[in-house]
């Protein structure tokens, strides 16, 4: 029997492991959670993810910088890798698949990887094309995997214009697919001009925006379902 | 050049130390963007064209940021197949994991990759417009260069976990940069910008900047003989005093810096270059926005009106002309 007290202690342990970028403790905590029969979903969202939310806050407050953020992400993945195989049913309400990558000419992928992490957490099937991805490849992969969502990232103004092309191609082939763009040079204005459904303001806010993306997608889905009824 | 000597000038200069070739310039020469990276004459002609067409007060080569990494043994991609404006990137890194960080510099580094080509381009621009405008070039800072030759992910984490190991690599890369910059000086470069954007406060804490990056920047600037500039983009408000301690003659910041505040911090004599947004203002902005922004740079106390990064080639010539006009007619 899992006592509330024990549960709370473990969630706290997972949360702190992420904040303190302690991979070993994250692994240990995840295994303990499984051993005592805790719901893995709860361990992920109320433990690991709530730790990551605190990391996002520390990052915004400029107490943490990118190196810390990367190490925290490693700790989150260390726990997630143990818990995920035991997740029966996701309770986030959205399930789907996403194609994600950094566009051709751009080799920056840290922001993209942080967004990807949030999709992993949310239980999406993630098709990560990596960085410096030829523009046609996004369309090809979306068709092949029938993904609901395509996320394009560009860190530099110099590569941003490639996104416009991909969006036009995707729209032509599959008008229903949702497209999100992100990266330092991207703005709402750019998203509107390029015809994207959403955008992540910059790499700094990638974490927060990824959470927002997921919830906005959830809303889209709810609306679609409400429409059916 | 009198600016660097600390002389009083009759107006604020308007130039750059970073790439500024334009699509209009390329068109007038009949050159493709990708070709400028691999041919000294084309590179030099493209660089000189911004001065010739619009009066922008400098000639800068190269165009891309991969010169040093390539000379150290990385493989680059110039996207020769593409009709788009794609800047070269690193295709194959030199260091693939933490255990490969103990590298040695090639004995003939100054002959590797495109360094001879770049030096030839410097000589050509110099011959072409050198009598009228200063000819500049740039190198990367050691941390930014490290981020090119190894996984940035690893580098960032190791700067936190194993700063001594990262420090050793930065020290070696500082040596490499000194060698490359020495060649550029020999070729006749009038000034050199060291671009250390990887160490921006968007990524690294000011504390790590001071302890891990600054010592190697100081090592480099101590060896440069021509006027030098340290450029960092993104958040720089907290590291401006450290940039001033680097030994560079001038510091360069982008639009995210509060220039008036930096001027206060560093005093009247410091050379601070900046800080207009080269894309959203100069390329995508209206003429009025350009004029307004340029006026603000000068109001804030910029020693030179200077972009926050490379100028994206599709910049409308009219906007550059408006900028030059604003600088020339500015009255404080």
Image (cartoon, coloured by chain):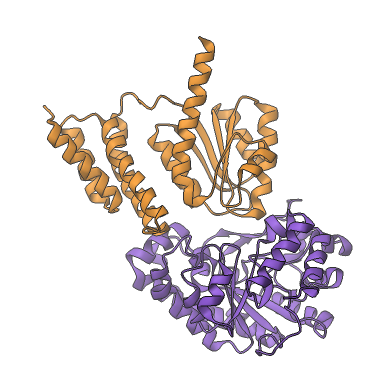
Chain colours: A orange, B purple
Query: Left or right: where does residue B31 sit relative to residue B247?
Result: right
Above or below residue B90? Residue B53 is below
Quadrant showing the C terminus of chain B: bottom right
What is the quadrant of the N terminus of chain B in the image? bottom right
What residue is rendered at 49% in x and 31% in y?
Answer: A216
Q: Residue shown at 68%/76% (left/top)?
A: B304
Residue A129 in percent (x, y) is at 54, 42
Q: Quadrant of residue B195?
A: bottom right
* Residue B315 in view here: no
Query: Residue B144, position in %: x, y?
Result: 52, 67
Q: Residue furthest top?
A: A229
* Residue B45 higher or lower than B3, as above or below: above
Residue A212 at x, y = what percent? 47, 37
Is residue A135 placed above or below A37 in the rendered structure? Answer: below
Q: Residue at x 33, y 40 (%)?
A: A49
Q: Is residue B104 left or right of residue A75?
A: right
A73 or A3: nearer the viewer: A3
Q: In the figure, is residue B148 to the left or right of A92?
A: right
């Amino acid at each position: 029997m899992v006592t509330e007290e024990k549960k709370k202690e473990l969630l706290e342990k997972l949360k702190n492991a992420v904040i303190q970028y302690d991979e070993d403790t994250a692994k240990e905590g995840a295994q303990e959670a499984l051993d005592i029969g805790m719901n893995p979903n709860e361990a992920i969202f109320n433990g690991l993810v709530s730790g990551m939310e605190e990391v996002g806050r520390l990052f915004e407050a400029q107490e943490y910088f990118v190196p810390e953020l990367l190490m925290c992400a490693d700790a989150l993945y260390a726990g997630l890798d143990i818990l995920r195989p035991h997740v029966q049913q996701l309770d986030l309400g959205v399930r789907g698949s996403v194609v994600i990558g950094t566009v051709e000419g751009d080799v920056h992928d840290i922001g993209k990887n942080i967004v990807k992490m949030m999709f992993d957490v949310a239980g999406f099937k993630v098709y990560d094309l990596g960085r410096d991805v030829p523009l046609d490849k996004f369309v090809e992969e979306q068709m092949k995997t029938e993904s609901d969502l395509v996320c394009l990232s560009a860190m530099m103004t110099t590569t941003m214009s490639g996104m416009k092309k991909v969006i036009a191609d995707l729209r032509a082939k599959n008008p229903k697919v949702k497209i999100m763009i992100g990266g330092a040079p991207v703005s709402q204005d750019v998203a509107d001009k390029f015809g994207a459904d959403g955008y992540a303001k910059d790499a700094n806010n990638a974490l927060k925006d990824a959470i927002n993306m997921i919830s906005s997608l959830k809303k889209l889905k709810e609306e679609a379902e409400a429409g059916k009824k | 050049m009198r600016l660097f000597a600390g002389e009083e000038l009759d107006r604020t200069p308007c130039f750059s130390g970073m790439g500024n070739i334009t699509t209009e310039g390329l068109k007038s020469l009949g050159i493709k963007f990708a070709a400028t990276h691999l041919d000294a004459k084309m590179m030099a002609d493209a660089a000189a064209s911004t001065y010739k067409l619009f009066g922008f007060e400098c000639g800068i080569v190269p165009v891309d940021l991969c010169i040093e990494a390539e000379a150290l043994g990385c493989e680059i991609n110039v996207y020769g197949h593409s009709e788009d404006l794609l800047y070269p990137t690193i295709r194959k890194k030199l260091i693939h994991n933490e255990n490969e960080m103990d590298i040695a510099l090639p004995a003939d580094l100054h002959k590797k990759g495109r360094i001879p080509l770049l030096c030839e381009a410097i000589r050509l621009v110099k011959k072409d417009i050198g009598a009228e405008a200063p000819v500049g070039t740039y190198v990367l800072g050691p941390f930014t260069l490290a981020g090119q030759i190894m996984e940035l992910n690893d580098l960032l984490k190791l700067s936190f976990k194993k700063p001594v190991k990262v420090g050793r690599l930065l020290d070696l890369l500082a040596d490499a940069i000194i060698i490359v910059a020495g060649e550029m000086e020999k070729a006749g470069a009038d000034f050199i910008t060291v671009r250390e954007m990887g160490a921006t406060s968007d990524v690294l804490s000011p504390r790590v900047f001071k302890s891990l990056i600054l010592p190697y920047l100081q090592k480099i600037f101590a060896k440069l003989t021509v006027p030098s500039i340290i450029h960092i983009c993104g958040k720089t408000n907290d590291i401006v005093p450290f940039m001033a301690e680097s030994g560079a003659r001038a510091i360069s910041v982008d639009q995210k810096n509060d220039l008036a505040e930096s001027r206060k911090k560093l005093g009247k004599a410091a050379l601070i270059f900046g800080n207009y947004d080269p894309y959203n203002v100069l390329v995508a902005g209206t003429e009025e926005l350009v004029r307004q922004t340029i006026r603000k740079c000068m109001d804030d106390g910029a020693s030179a009106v200077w972009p926050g990064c490379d100028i994206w080639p599709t910049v409308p010539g009219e906007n550059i002309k408006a900028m030059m006009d604003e600088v020339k007619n500015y009255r404080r």
